[in-house]
Image (cartoon, helix red, strand yellow):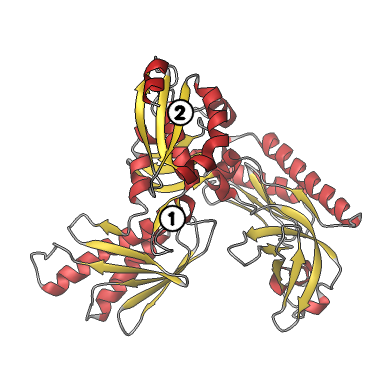
Amino acid sequence: MKKLIMNVREGNERAAIVEDNELLEVMHAEDAGNVGNIYIGKIVTVLAGMQAAFVDIGTGKNAYLHLHDTAKFIQSKKKEANINRCVHEGQYILVQIVKDEVDDKGAKVTERLEFTGKYAVYMPFDGAVTASRKISDETKRAELLSLGRSLCASTDGIIFRSAANEVGINVVEDELRYIREKYVELTGALQRATKVTLLHTVASFLDYVLQLYPVEQFEEIIVDSVSYKQMIGHEHVVCYRERENVFSHYRIETQIEEAVHKVVPLKNGAYIVIEHTEAMTVIDVNTGKFVGKQHLQDTAVKTNEWAAIEVAKQLRLRNIGGMVLIDFINMKKEEDKVRVKSVMQRELRKDRTTSRVYDFTALGVLEVTRKRSGKSLRDQLQHVCQECHGSGHVRSDKETFHQLERELWEYKGTDVEAIIVEANKGFVQVVQPQMEQLKASLGYEVFIVDIASCSTTYHIRYIGSIEGAKERM
């Protein structure tokens, strides 16, 4: 059973995709980032050698625009091959972020704009009207395509999403008209442009999640907010009302904790080890306790198949992007390598993020790339440890506070009058402002005490009455 579980009650918005109680993907509000935002940008540099330009969009770092993402290249049907004939310095253009800035690299932008609605995606320069393959009703499909062609110019493009199959044609038409009017407004703003401006932002975290995963994909949607239940407005939505945090109740919290461990056990006693470097992620496959009942080579191949399934799952769950090298157990036969590679390709097709599986190297290492999309789960939850000078990772202060926040919320509405929390001085200083806000919502007193400790975690020392807390202070 495939479920979407959303935790928004405590203010730190998160969503989890779960299938048969196994966590497949976790999303945070900040994952939405700036991808999809549309700006009036100003060309500051054109680099003919790179066939690219750098665009000021007002975010601090100049964004990267490649020739293939310019409007003139698209409109010329890919015949225009010179960046200098597509854009020039000082020019104002409409651009959309397709990849967020990472570290010292600016965002990647395009003039190939996309407006994603609940029922359709509108692309002003695409020139094709199509419908999702999941719309199997031929009458409805023809009706949608006819609508798209009647509303759009020859240069416009539309993709009707599977959700369009569930509503009347007039609902889809209203959304399309609204999206097209939005685009006309933006082009008008560009004609009047005198400065760099943010024109359009992606909607809420809920909209971000439902654009990636329409409600029809799930057999059950669980949210811990009445307002979210109403906004989703689907028959399969359930409102979770228990005191325990919804992620804790469904064992998602535990699985998130496990997803930052280096060692991942396989069901047969073997295991994989995931290591991160600046340039790539390296994954090592080990047989561990598994020796099998057959020939040693059969054991290696079987373990490698299980490992390929788990690696694909971990890449998605941990949101690992970039270059990935997988050191499988040595296989002598070429057909065995083809078999393992095929398993890897099959499993990666389940991931919404694009991946590519290359070949085994001479040393038996399989090369894989996965498109970078937002922060990895490790970077979301951890920061470089100052005590060990970057040799390890610990949970970040922000995430530790959210963990404490979720734990404190479980005592709201009980007879608890006060709680004493102990933590290191640095953590206390960072979270004190948020803690004052939180106390007003909880309805009981929280005393947070700094202690001499290099630990980045906290300890709840006392739960009880006000008098009891004051005696222990």
Q: Is residue 428 left or right of residue 200?
A: left
Asked whether, in this view, residue 141 is left or right of residue 124, the answer is left
* Residue type, mark 1 in image: Arg
Q: In the rendered image of this protein, does residue 118 appear above or below residue 232?
A: below
> Which residue is at the front of the view, 180 or 58?
58
Tell which residue pokes out farthest to the left in this image.
Answer: 293
Residue 46: which quarter of the image? bottom right
Q: Which residue is pictured at 63% across the width and 47% down the height?
A: 142
Report which quarter residue 60 is drawn in.
bottom right
- Residue 19, x across and y down, in percent: 36, 43
Question: Taking 267 as reference, is 349 left or right?
Answer: right
Q: In x, y percent, where is residue 420?
A: 40, 28
Name the residue type under label 2.
Phe
Residue neighbourhood size for the residue with mark 1, other residues' Cα within 10 Å, grouped as few (<14), some (14–19), many (≥20): many
Residue 12 shows in the view: no
Q: Residue 171, image x and y in percent?
A: 68, 35
Decide which of tag 1 and tag 2 comes sooner along the chain.
1
Q: Nearer the viewer, mark 1 or mark 2?
A: 2
Image quarter of the C terminus = top left
Residue drawn at x 57%, y 26% is: 227
The N terminus lies in quadrant? top left
Q: What residue is disc 2 on? A: 447
List the residue tagged with mark 1. Answer: 378
